[in-house]
Amino acid sequence: MACCAVRCILITTCVIQLVSTIQRQILDFLGYMWTPILVNFFQIIFAILGIFGAYQYKIKYITCYAVWTSLWLGWNVFVICVYFEAGILTRDTEVLNMGTGSRSWWLVNGAGCRPIYNTSHEDPFYFPTPSSVEGCVIEYFYIEAIQAAVQCFLAVLGIISASFTIYVFTRDDDSFDFIGGFESLSTYHSPAKASQMCLQPMFSETD
């Protein structure tokens, strides 16, 4: 019973991660955010690996998923720090766009946003970015931070459920082998006892 419940939680978490990461990947493609695109690609692979591992009782696959999800958690914490400009980090950092100058898709496509472009200076090697954006209902960095925070929550839930799933699978395997040992032992010895009883010599007294 515990095994089924833990597996369902893990599979559900992986499915939600998969769907939300695909949605995030599409928006990162539209914004040409190359580093998140690369990281999202690996997340999609390991989410599928987690689903397959939980469904097929593959402990090694679940372990790989748990290890990667820990890295995925760290990445999303870093993204939140970037968009909130924690410490020395700034939103203009080239870590997310690999030096192409591209920005988040939400910068100009958020609700009510009106981008203003400065056409007097254009660099052909950089993506066009607005000099300012007005009228946004919610700033783009809040949206990006919320997306990353949701992924952090799912990552924590995935790590916990994966750890419990590995524990339950391992415990059930040990219990199965232990009980099976007794069953095999009794099965092995019962015919032997029967054969000994059948082959027991009979002596008769003769005058």
Image (cartoon, rainbow, N blue to C red):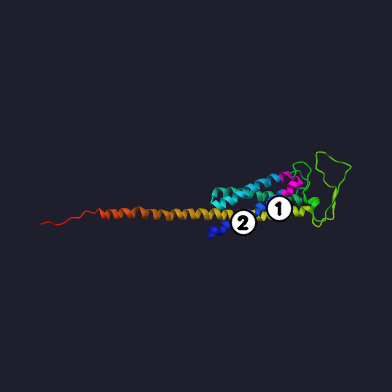
Q: Secondary structure at mark 1?
A: helix
Residue plotted at (68% across, 47% down): 40
In the picture of the structure, the residue carrying the numbered disc 2 is: 12
Q: Main secondary structure of the magenta part?
A: helix
Q: Above or below — where is 132 with respect to 123? A: below
Q: Across the whole image, how many numbered discs are drawn on residues? A: 2
- Relative to residue 19, is residue 166 drawn left or right? left
Q: Which residues are magenta?
A: 26-36
> How far across and down, in percent of the image, does residue 183 sit?
39, 55
Q: Residues within 10 Å of mark 2 (few under 14, many from 20)?
A: some
Residue plotted at (57% across, 54% down): 163
Q: Secondary structure at mark 2?
A: helix
Which numbered disc, 1 or 2, marks the residue closer to the eye? 2
> How far across and down, in percent of the image, does residue 143 sit?
75, 54
Asked if disc 1 and disc 2 are in contact, CB closer than 8 Å, the reply is: no
Q: Above or below — where is 93 with respect to 200? A: above
In the picture of the structure, the residue carrying the numbered disc 1 is: 148
Q: Is residue 197 magenta?
A: no
> How far across and down, in percent of the image, does residue 120 sit?
89, 42
Q: Residues within 10 Å of mark 1 (few under 14, many from 20)?
A: many
> How far across and down, in percent of the image, does residue 137 sit?
81, 57
Q: Amino acid at mark 2?
A: Thr
Pick whichever, 174 or 32, lies toward us.
Answer: 32
Q: Is residue 30 magenta?
A: yes
Pick whichever, 10 or 155, lies toward us.
Answer: 10
- Relative to residue 36, is residue 50 drawn left or right? left
